Image (cartoon, coloured by chain):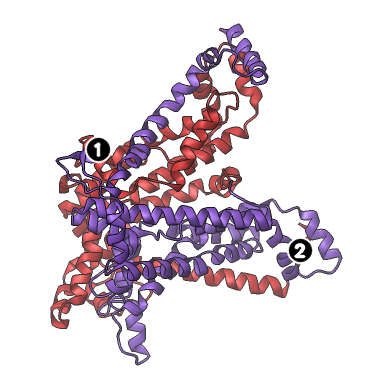
Chain colours: A red, B purple
Amino acid sequence: MMLRKKFTLFDVIVHIIGVLLLILVLYPLILVVSCSISDPQLVATGQVVFLPKGITFDGYIQIFKDPDILIGYGNTIFYTFFGTIINLLVTVPAGYVLTKKTLPGGKFFTAFFMFIMYFSGGLIPSFLVVNGLGLYNTRLVLLILGAFNTYNCIICRTFFASMPKELEEAAIIDGCSVIGTFVKVILPLSKALLGVMVLYFAVWHWNSYFDAMIYIKDDAMQPLQVFLRRMLILAQQMADNAEAAEYAHSLANLEAMMRYAVIVVSSLPLLIVYPFLQKYFDKGVMIGSVKG
Amino acid sequence: MKKKKESGAVHTAVSTKRPGQSLGARIWKHRQYYLLLLPAVVYVAIFCYAPMYGLQIAFKDYKVSLGVTGSPWVGLLNFTDFFQGYYFWNLIRNTLAISFYTLLVGFPIPIIVALILNELRPKFKKATQTVLYAPHFISTVVIVGMITLFFSPSLGVVNTVLEFFGADSIYFMGDPKYFRHLYVWSGVWQDMGWGAIIYLAALAGVDPSLHEAASIDGASRLQRIIHINLPCIASTVIIMLILQIGSIASVGYEKVYLMQNDLNMTVSEVISTYVYKRGLINNNYSFSTAVGLFNNLVNVFMLLIANAVSRKFSETSLF
């Protein structure tokens, strides 16, 4: 790059802004980690503002003794794993088929899928359908809901449309069936797409709580996020609303520190995984996907 | 098998020119494609279109014992109840205030972030991107949990800093004054990096020769950003803007719901959280469906207007 040789004043300013953005994003994350391994008394009195003080791992030890967190974690892993598989089986083949311009009714199906991006039955009618199918308070509902995602389907379609046609033509001339070609020829060449799809769907399953709140009644089936909501938000609101003396007391116990530890434990898996897939979502996969 | 497929391809090519010719045969030739499409069609039919049939209860007095079809019609009663209801203007005001605030702040910032990232040295750029994406992968529950903890009057770091400078501690989550700022700016923190991806992809497509030509003509870096980069990503910006305007009446109810408490309810109750509470907590199915339908129609209306305006003035449009 000819234009980038000298480090000008402009570069200095832009890089300073870059560093400021880094600090802005990193600071809250570092603070959570610091608080999670600091003495709860020091956290409660506001002495931990950046680096950890009075290091202890009691919060983490406490988490692994908490039955709710363990049940929630197990459930979330279950929903994320099988839910993502269902997502892929439903959404990715649809994206492939929609690239076929010769398909009778192809335009109808595209419209059929696009329409739901803009208009929906809404909360109550959806609830009635799920309820009517007997899916209320079953694990199945959290695996099935959202199985098809129009936006991700469009990303798939854009990706498949950019692949050279000769590949499938050759496979079909060699006597491969359509489904065989898709599974044996197209998919092995679509690792970038599949990586991004797995990431998007898995993140969605891992982080969602609203469907569970609406459709799941038993605690034994609740995902992690529902327990997190109780621990992080509802409990803290109660503490904040209580009298000063009372909350000072309640904060002294380990529960307060467990909250920071639980943030780390619940968020870490995704934060570790995404940098490995970054090159895929940084590059082409997104291009052209905005406009259907 | 081989011949079959080849003739199928020829056949379809021909039959597009002569419509009506053996449609059944063409469908049969594509049967495996339909098989691949089937799971998605079944899912969408059951979980997206069947609820649309259920929308009729917005015009009915829904009784569980009578079912969707059997419940008596009441015309627009549920809608007039909503429009004349005590909460109506408050809900509209809260929803639009959060939406416009989000649009005003949350829309331009990812564009600016993308323009800045694009000017960084490659290695530093990549590291910054990685960090800036991180909050996107944190769940809404955890984000709201972090806001609750950091802005807590007792143990929050924000109040520690305020007290250090001699100010009084503030209960941010319980004060209606701060609700919108917390909601919007925490959203900016979470998604400014992720939102920039789409613009970065567009910036990667800018022809380098434009920059070379401009710099030979003596254009500064800033001038080149304004006169080359911005026009090059303009169509992406417009598409994203249309999509945002099309969801103006629906704010991220999951996050709003999590941030709500009794003290900030006067500004934090929005249409979608109201739909949830009236419907699933108070079991007021018909009324709640009517409110939800109204919300959805406003969104569609806004999307169509934004799309039409954009098509007229910029030749960029969704459809």
Q: Nearer the viewer, residue A124 or B226?
A: A124
Mark 2: secondary structure? loop
- Confirm whether residue B39 shows in the render: yes
Q: Give me the C-alpha separation between circle 1 and circle 2.
A: 72 Å
* Residue annotated with mark 1: B69
Side of B293 where A101 appears, left or right: right
Identify residue type, mark 2: Lys
Other residues around mark 2 within 10 Å, as few (<14) / some (14–19) / many (≥20): few
Identify residue type, mark 1: Thr
Other residues around mark 1 within 10 Å, as few (<14) / some (14–19) / many (≥20): few
Q: Return the chain for callout 1.
A: B
**Circle 1/circle 2 CB separation < 8 Å:** no
Give percent across and percent down for residue B165: 38, 90
Q: From the viewer's perspective, is the residue at label 1 or at label 2 nearer?
A: 1
Which residue is at a point 60% across and 33% down the rendered structure image? A161
Mark 1: secondary structure? helix
Question: Which numbered disc covers residue A5?
Answer: 2
- Confirm whether residue A7 shows in the render: no
Give percent across and percent down for residue B33: 50, 22
Side of B102 where A189 appears, left or right: right
